[in-house]
Amino acid sequence: MKIGVVGTFNRDIILPWHGEKAESIGGIYFSVLYLANLLHPTAAIYPIANLGEDFYDVVVNGLSDYKNLRLDGLKRLAEKNTQVTLTYTSQHERDEFISKPMPPLGFAELAILQEVDAVIFNLITGTDVGLNALRKFRQSTNALIYLDFHSRALGINGNGKRFYRPPADWQDWIELVDVLQLNEMEARTLAGYSTDQPVEILVEFGKEVLQLNPSVCHITLGDKGSYLFYFEGEQMKHKKFKAISLTNAVDAIGCGDGFAAAYLMKYFSTRDEVKATEFANQVAALNCTFVGSSRINEIQTLIKEANF
């Protein structure tokens, strides 16, 4: 199996709701590590990203132990890497401050992925890859395209603080992908729903997304579980998954990344959207039990111990 991961590696400064300040590699580092640890060592995982010269060696060293990673798509640039400061205001909510994003990737950087089975486009900064590059890539490949919309739903103010706002071109992105992942606030932002409206209102938006082209849409809801929207034959269906309750949750960073990696891994082995989403929710829940990326390399053991 061959999977690409496109996005940005951040230098993360984490100020958790409980616990001490931590610094780690963030962004698509989580997606890449989850795939490397969930997939067989004979798989091939291709991270594609621009890296600042101050962070290139840190990232490469962090990935060097995995034989199923292909690092040809990492490009060193003569500038500082993107840094993100994450300050939690509750267990599941945080303020984000970002430095200058890395330059967007173009089609030339994506060409190495034309023969892979799937690609996760994880919009860590929101400008990780150009829309035209994604469109051209869509036309050139049969790979399953999985889009985590993520920071494309966020603007940046003059102080680097991120805030929710719907980009004018959001439908243009969504119509190019096979699987779309949104969290609750991203979905509410794109749909124009306020936080006062019940979460059930997102069901209508999920159905609207499938009419734009994706065959699957995930809306993750934190401690309220997740919604899956998919097709069974010609029939559009949706399913609500309950949250997995864990008493030792400490950090939600990387939950969405673990969710996406786990979904793809299980989907390609079962071709079953429901089973894949169940597994994705399990991995996302386990991700909350450690800070940053510190125990992703133990995820197989954590899954067995959890005995879901």
Image (spheres, helix red, strand yellow):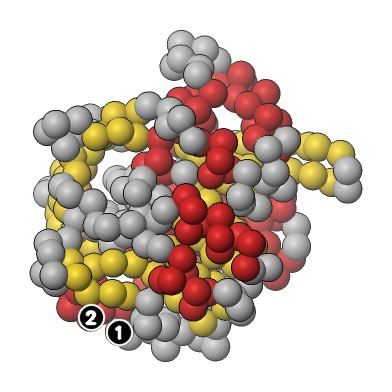
Residue shown at 37% from the left, 62% from the top: 105
Can the viewer see residue 34 in this picture?
no
User: With 195 as the anchor, is 13 left or right in this view?
Assistant: left
Q: In this view, does 106 lie above or below 205?
A: below
Three-letter amino acid code of the residue under disc 1: Ser
Marks 2,1: beta carbons within 8 A: yes
The answer to which of 78 and 35 lies nearer the viewer is 78
Q: What element carries label 1?
A: loop
Which label is found at residue 64?
Answer: 1
Q: Is residue 75 above or below residue 243?
A: below
User: With 198 as the anchor, is 196 left or right in this view?
Assistant: left
For the image shown, how many numbered marks are present on the structure? 2
Which label is found at residue 61?
Answer: 2
Q: Residue 66, position in %: x, y? A: 38, 84
Residue shown at 68% from the left, 38% from the top: 212
Hey, which quadrant is residue 31 in on the image?
bottom left
Q: In which quarter of the image is the N terminus?
A: bottom right
Which label is found at residue 80?
Answer: none
Q: How many other residues sit within 10 Å of disc 1, few (<14), some (14-19) or many (≥20)?
A: few
Q: What element carries label 2?
A: helix
Q: Residue 82, position in %: x, y? A: 19, 55
Residue shown at 63% from the left, 72% from the top: 117
Mark-to-mark CA distance, 2 and 1? 5 Å
Residue shown at 71% from the left, 53% from the top: 273
Three-letter amino acid code of the residue under disc 2: Asn
Q: Residue 252, position in %: x, y? A: 35, 45
